[in-house]
Image (cartoon, rainbow, N blue to C red):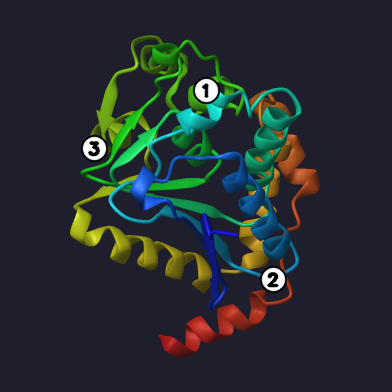
Amino acid sequence: MNDLVLCELSEGICTLTLNRPEKLNALSVESFRQIAAHLDRVEMRDLGCVVLKGAGRSFCAGHDLDDLASGAEAGAVERFEAGVIERLANLPLPVIAVVQGHCYTGGLELVLAADIIIASTDARFADTHAKWDLVPVWGLTQRLQRRVGRSKAMEMMFASRTYSGEEAREVGLANICVPPDRLETEASRFCGDILANSSRSTRAMKKMLADTDGLPLAAGLAWELYHSEGHGPAMQARITAAREQR
């Protein structure tokens, strides 16, 4: 079986790399099967974060059009693929996407499962479902508007326009945008910042955000007050270590 998705576990980080550079990492049914298998491994380990990236000059040019044209992806297969993206989005630990080059349509739906998007200035984001007479089934209509706002999401979906990495950062699609030669360094630095913090805290905060999504402010505040996990077992040791460093 070809490794369409590589998985590397190192120092508390799981790096998933889309590995079809000759096809700009276009997503196929087999790509999703391999992502699902790697997520099985992630869920069984105590990790600090997951990094999602693409090999070569692009993150992901989108859905493999050959698969679509063949009729191989419909019904149960589409639901399976949507479920894999949902699993990625619902991982209890932070998910960071690192984007260079193309991030189109299916690739955009995949990247929207990440909590943090770090983009290169040479990144190009676009939703081209309408160009191919398609309607999203992997969550784009829901996740994109929650990320950039309803009107900007409609602009992106209706016109199929392309947006640079910097434009993506300006509208809130990307969190960070850096030149191509700094992309890997910035991603490594950001992951390092996460790993330096309490994984118990980051996991609890991600769960809190998910549990209160869509609640009115007053209800969200009440939920936080009564459901927060609060002080952790490492709190005192961390405070003591910080004082000693000073």
Q: Quadrant of residue 24?
A: top left
Taking the image as shown, residue 153 lies to the left or right of residue 16, namely left
Q: Residue at horizontal 73%, vertical 23%? A: 75
Taking the image as shown, residue 57 lies to the left or right of residue 40, namely left
Does residue 140 lie above or below 30 as drawn?
above
In the foreground, 85 or 30: 30
Residue identifier under label 1:
69
Does residue 41 lie above or below 87 as drawn?
below
Q: Residue at horizontal 45%, vertical 18%? A: 129
Q: Tell which tag, 1 or 2, sits nearer the viewer.
A: 1
Whole-percent x, y for residue 116 in the image: 46, 47
In the foreground, 79 or 161: 79
Residue identifier under label 2:
46
Q: Quadrant of residue 101?
A: top left
Whole-percent x, y for residue 192 in the image: 44, 70
- The reply to whether callout 1 and callout 3 are in contact (CB within 8 Å) is no
Residue 151 in sight in this render: no
State which tag comes first along the sequence, 1 or 2. 2
Residue identifier under label 3:
166
Q: Residue at horizontal 27%, vertical 39%? A: 165
In whole angstroms, how far apart are the C-alphas of marks 1 and 3? 33 Å
Label 1 environment density (alpha carbons within 10 Å; few <14, some 14–19, many ≥20)? few
Residue 29 in sight in this render: yes
State which tag comes first along the sequence, 3 or 2. 2
Q: Tell me the quarter of the image containing the C terminus.
A: bottom left
